[in-house]
Image: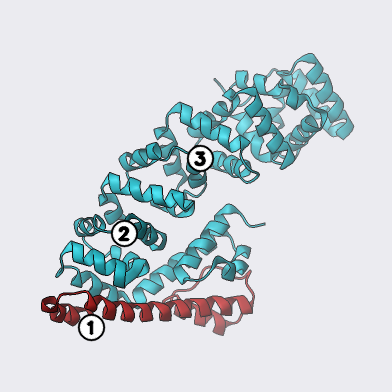
Amino acid sequence: MSTLAQRAEVLKLARVLGVPPSQLEYLHKLDANVIRRLREQASAALFDADRKLFQRVAAATRLLPAPLIAIIAEKAIGPLLCARTTGLLPPERAVEISKRLKTGFLADLCLELDPRPASDVIAAMPVGRVVEVSRELARRKEYITMARFVDCLDDHAIRAVMEDLRDDEVLLRIGFFVEDKQRLGDILDLLPRERLLNIVRVAAGGDAELWPEALAMINSIEEPQRRQMANLAAELEEAAIVRMIESTQVQGLWPAMLPVVSMMTIDSQRRLINLPVLQNEAVLAAFIQAVDSADLWTQLLPLVALMDNAGQARAARIAESQGLKMAARLTESLRAPAKPAAHA
Amino acid sequence: MSEKQLAALAKELGGKSPPDLSALNMAEIESLTQSLRRARRAQQEQLQRAFESALGHIPMLLRGPVRKILLP
């Protein structure tokens, strides 16, 4: 099964080549980084092939007033060619023209634009215009495109966009596609705590795709933000945690969930491990098996020591049924003092 | 994957060696090369059409100088 990163890269390459993504289905065999490299080469080759013509378009814009250029851009040049010319325009001129372009056209242009060569233009865009175009892209569910602009926009613009986009599921889905995980961490820092809490709630309670991707995202960010997200997850109301654990169980996501649990404070871990949903035999068995498979005994088996007596007995019984070696490891951990990896 | 096919792909990528595509078969490499070739042709055709169409929107007085820049 292809990953979200592979699908995103295939879609971006399909846009560069002007073909439907289904025509590039065979590329899902490649690693996302390989597809990305291929896309970067294709994009550069297409630009270089007609560099002189794009430079002529940029030169011609100097002779004409901005309102006329905007009309010509929309009626004659089109979003694709405009996108490929954007990086050749002086930023202040590009901004002047963009003010005259319809928001829908600018959104079309963003779909075709490679943000990096045009980063000066993007950075110079007035925040209000950025917010309008973001709103339109979000309406079209163009989350992959939105994520590409994150690197080029400053915190002020990002904050304004996030304040405007009130739907936390939209923010989460954009977050999945942000390539620079350091930048993603910076952006999480810009969000108020309540909003972050709701993002975790939405991730845990959403459709089948949301939770695995949210877990992958949490596991990919820097440790301070990862720890923060883990503890926010533990703070959720019980019904939301139950949904989170059920999604983890049904989708076989314990190997991805355990590192998140290991980041929680001892109090959070104690609350989690003693929830009735984790005392369910099947859930606890899957949890214990995942700990064993991922060799996370030292980090996570001390959780068993945080269980109440009935929970410990149940865990011991399950471990015993899994074989002598696992039972021995469990017994050993129960003798050891509780030292989870996370600290308050 | 033959050397000839990889060379054809590299040519469409502006002379640069592609990343490791060993997971793709010959037909897939060929298809990718064709997609790149078609994209390049489509871009050139679009540019020509756009230049002609753009001139129609420009006032007579400026049409000459702009034509000189776009279509020298």
Same-chain check, marks 3 and 2: yes
Q: Are marks 1 and 3 on the same chain?
A: no
Q: Which residue is mark 1?
A: B71
Query: What residue do we see at 54% from left, 63% from top?
Result: A10
The answer to whether marks 1 and 3 mark residues whose Cβ atoms lie closer than 8 Å is: no
Circle 2: is it few (<14), some (14-19), or many (20+) Cα within 10 Å?
Answer: some
- Chain of residue at mark 1: B
Please, is residue B46 above or below residue A200 in the view? below
Residue type, mark 1 in image: Leu
Q: Quadrant of residue A271?
A: top right
Do labels 2 and 1 touch, CB within 8 Å?
no
Q: Residue at x 39, y 77 (%)?
A: B43
- Residue at 36% x, 51% y is A133
Tell me if I can see residue A295 in this picture.
Answer: no
Q: Is residue A84 left or right of residue A222?
A: left
Q: Which mark is residue A221?
A: 3
Viewport quadrant of the N terminus of chain A:
bottom right
Choose mark 2 or mark 1, whichever is in front: 1
Q: Nearer the viewer, residue A56 or B6?
A: A56
Q: Which residue is mark 2?
A: A118
Where's the C terminus of chain A, which quadrant?
Answer: top right
Query: How far across and how far down the image is residue A64, in percent?
Result: 16, 68
- Helix, strand or loop at label 2? It is loop
Q: Position of residue A275 (x, y in %)?
A: 71, 22
Q: Quadrant of residue A77?
A: bottom left
Of callouts 3 and 2, the N-terminal one = 2
For the residues labelled 1 and 3, the Cα–Cα distance comes to 50 Å
In this rendering, do the residues under marks 2 and 1 share a single chain?
no
Vertical order, A158 against A55 (above or below): above
The residue closer to the viewer here, A210 or A152, is A210
Q: Colour of chain A?
A: cyan
Looking at the colours in the rendered structure, which chain would you say is drawn in red?
B
